[in-house]
Amino acid sequence: MRKIIVATLLAGGAVASPALAQDVGPTFTGPRVEAILGYDHVGAGSDVDNDNGRNDQSIDGLLYGVGAGYDVNLGSAVVGVEGEFTNSTAKSSRYDFTDDFGFGRVKQGRDLYIGARAGILADPATLVYVKGGYTNSKLKVLAGDTDETTNTAFKLDGWRIGAGVERAINTNTFAKVEYRYSNYNKGRIRFDDGATSRNFDVDTDRHQVVASVGYRF
């Protein structure tokens, strides 16, 4: 009888072990890549004198790009590093010349970001996180009252913070929604002939709400 009980327990353990291993799979850990799409708003910061009696000088558009990162699942928390390359359709109007927010008529160009994030697991498939890091943005100067870009551009340096929720669809795929705020406080001009100015102070705000889908290796 004792042998029968032992054999039954061993068989039950053999069946339970694979199921348990599947439940605690490597979610939210390892390298990842993702596609990014969302809303982009770039405008004057609080230190900018708009000279038009209102504080709404800004440009808006569609943000799109790609990101990559590496995460480590610590059990109840996740930490990681990440980077992004994005672009945007935001640009100054051809007809309303009050949206220059200190740069004249411009079109939002590429943006580079590198930073870190940390979060807690609300449940085994849901990560709530905060993030922060360095961002470098480019504003292309538009020619006259056209939509044509020139070879002159502003390059801006700043910082970014944000927060989001990521949901694991399965072990390898995920989706997330994120808000982030960026402030650019240093700028320089790259002129048409390739010359670059010295750094100067700026105050430019950027708000983004984005959604991402990605794959974890």
Image (cartoon, rainbow, N blue to C red):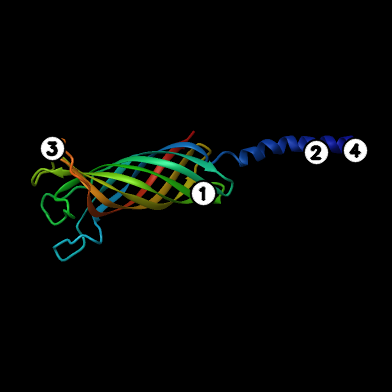
Mark 1 and mark 4: span between their CA atoms? 44 Å
Which residue is tagged 4? Answer: 2
Sequence order check: which comes first, mark 1 or mark 4?
4
Residue in the picture at 58% in, 49% down = 76
Mark 3 and mark 2: span between their CA atoms? 77 Å
Mark 2 and mark 1: span between their CA atoms? 34 Å
Question: Secondary structure under badge 1?
Answer: strand
Which residue is tagged 3? Answer: 192
User: Where 43 sits versus 137, above or below?
Assistant: below
Three-letter residue code for mark 4: Arg
Of badges 2 and 1, nearer the viewer stands: 1
Question: Secondary structure under badge 4?
Answer: helix
Which residue is tagged 1? Answer: 126
Three-letter residue code for mark 2: Leu
> Of all residues shown, which one is farthest toward the front?
198
Question: Secondary structure under badge 2?
Answer: helix
Mark 1 and mark 3: span between their CA atoms? 48 Å
Three-letter residue code for mark 1: Thr
Rendered location of residue 86, percent (x, y): 31, 41
Which residue is tagged 2? Answer: 9
154 or 89, nearer to the observer: 154
Dot 2 surroundings within 10 Å: few (below 14), some, or many (20 or more)? few
Mark 3 and mark 4: span between their CA atoms? 88 Å
Of badges 3 and 4, nearer the viewer stands: 3
131 or 56, nearer to the observer: 131
Sequence order check: which comes first, mark 2 or mark 1?
2
Rendered location of residue 64, percent (x, y): 31, 42
The answer to which quarter of the image holds residue 213 is: top left
User: Where 184 sits versus 72, above or below?
Assistant: below
Rendered location of residue 1, percent (x, y): 91, 37
Residue 28 in sight in this render? no
